[in-house]
């Protein structure tokens, strides 16, 4: 439920409501707005008595939350959330500007990473992606450089100022990834790794959460809820395509997720057209479509030599293709009152 305080309610009245909520065995999340304060009540409140709070001093009304997710829901927070990427330029995801996170699928070497980092920075990216811990279908495939890869990402940040977005696959990697990264990526295969979601919620870095390849949007938002309910509100939702019977693409990129997630949630939505199609020649069109549909950001695989990439070369675009894509989305962004 949400306890909506009267405009002009005092901090003491809000404190008192918080105390009553805790006495009910529930947790609170206080949102101080410009007009009024709202206390979102977290926990299973289905059997709790709402009327007990309705007559408390300073309370305007108590509204039940209908969505199974609460903190991620639009019902709790109407305004869109702005999630900081923690890069040198202070870029935030969820505002007027379409933020572009670009870089290789995997960190492979110093030269490879730095070349691409400088190139994408030059062409307008605000974030650098690159996996150091890679979730691979085959145990015989390249598994990533591990901490050495994280060190290279930190070096790339130092040289370019780009915010570092990189994947964390397990609870015991959270500390080391959070030490180097600006944004923790939780991959599709781990969307329902609840222990990992909890651990990501208990540390302060923003989280880019990818939709599981067979997850519904409700399951996706409940995964975000795990992170948020542990105290980390800085979650970005990333649609990266779902598994269907279709074979002409690696995954089916569900672009309708952008307006639908915006309808039910205040969290920013990022599109990954690389995992979303598996084909480098489809990336440009999907970037344009994503921006037209209102995406808050893009995460794109860019490689200095896609033919020799250790992972996901077929869906990685070249530096030159990235430059062309940036130009074309600029025109789309302007047409829908955004910038890129
Ligand atoms: C990736 O970003 O390279 C990746 C493995 O993504 P996903 O978790 O969406 O498959
Ligand atoms: Mn990849």
Image (cartoon, helix red, strand yellow):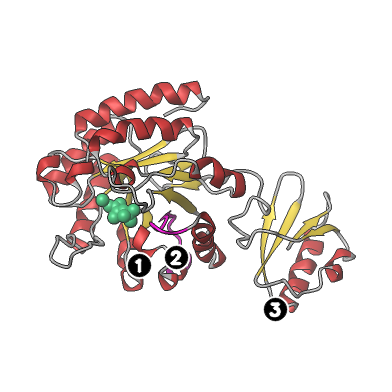
Left or right of 133 in this view: 227: right
Q: Quadrant of residue 100 in the image?
A: top left
Residue 133, horizontal then vertical, whole percent: 24, 62
Residue 132 visible at all:
yes
Check the image and report above or below for 21 versus 273. below
The segment highlighted magenta reads: 199-215
Left or right of 229 in this view: 116: left
Quarter of the N terminus within the rendering: bottom right
| Callout 3 secondary element | loop
In-front residue for pair 213/168: 213
Left or right of 20 in this view: 167: left
> Distance of mark 3 from mark 1, alpha carbons?
29 Å
The residue labelled by disc 1 is 174
Tag 1 and tag 2, C-beta contact below 8 Å: yes
Sequence-wise, the earlier of marks 3 and 2 is 3
The residue labelled by disc 2 is 203
**Circle 3: is it few (<14), some (14-19), or many (20+) Cα within 10 Å?**
few
**Circle 2: is it few (<14), some (14-19), or many (20+) Cα within 10 Å?**
some
The residue labelled by disc 3 is 25
């Amino acid at each position: 439920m949400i306890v909506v305080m009267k405009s002009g309610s005092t901090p003491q009245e809000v404190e008192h409501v918080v105390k009553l909520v805790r006495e009910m065995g529930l947790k609170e999340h206080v949102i101080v707005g410009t007009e009024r304060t709202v206390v979102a009540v977290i926990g299973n409140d289905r059997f709790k008595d709402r009327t007990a709070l309705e007559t408390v001093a300073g309370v305007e009304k108590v509204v039940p939350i209908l969505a199974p997710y609460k903190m991620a829901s639009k019902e709790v927070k109407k305004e869109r959330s702005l999630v900081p990427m923690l890069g040198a330029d202070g870029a935030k995801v969820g505002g007027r500007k379409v933020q572009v996170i670009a870089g290789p699928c995997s960190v492979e070497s110093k030269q490879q990473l730095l070349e691409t980092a400088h190139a994408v920075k030059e062409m307008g990216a605000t974030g650098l992606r690159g996996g150091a811990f890679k979730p691979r279908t085959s145990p015989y495939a390249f598994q990533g450089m591990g901490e050495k890869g994280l060190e290279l990402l930190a070096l790339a940040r130092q040289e370019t100022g780009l915010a570092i977005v990189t994947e964390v696959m397990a609870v015991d990697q959270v500390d080391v990834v959070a030490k180097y990264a600006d944004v923790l990526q939780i991959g599709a295969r781990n969307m329902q790794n609840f222990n990992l979601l909890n651990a990501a919620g208990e540390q302060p870095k923003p989280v880019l959460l990818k939709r599981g390849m067979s997850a519904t949007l409700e399951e996706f938002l409940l995964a975000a809820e795990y992170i948020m309910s542990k105290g980390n509100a800085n979650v970005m939702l990333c649609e990266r395509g779902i598994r269907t019977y279709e074979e002409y693409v690696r995954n089916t990129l569900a672009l309708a997720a952008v307006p639908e997630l915006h309808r039910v949630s205040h969290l920013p939505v990022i599109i990954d057209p690389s995992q979303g199609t598996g084909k480098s020649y489809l990336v440009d069109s999907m970037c344009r479509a994503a921006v037209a549909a209102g995406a808050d950001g893009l995460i794109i695989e860019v490689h200095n030599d896609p033919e020799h990439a250790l992972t996901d070369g077929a869906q990685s675009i070249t530096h030159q293709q990235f430059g062309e894509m940036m130009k074309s989305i600029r025109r789309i962004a302007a047409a829908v009152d955004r910038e890129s």
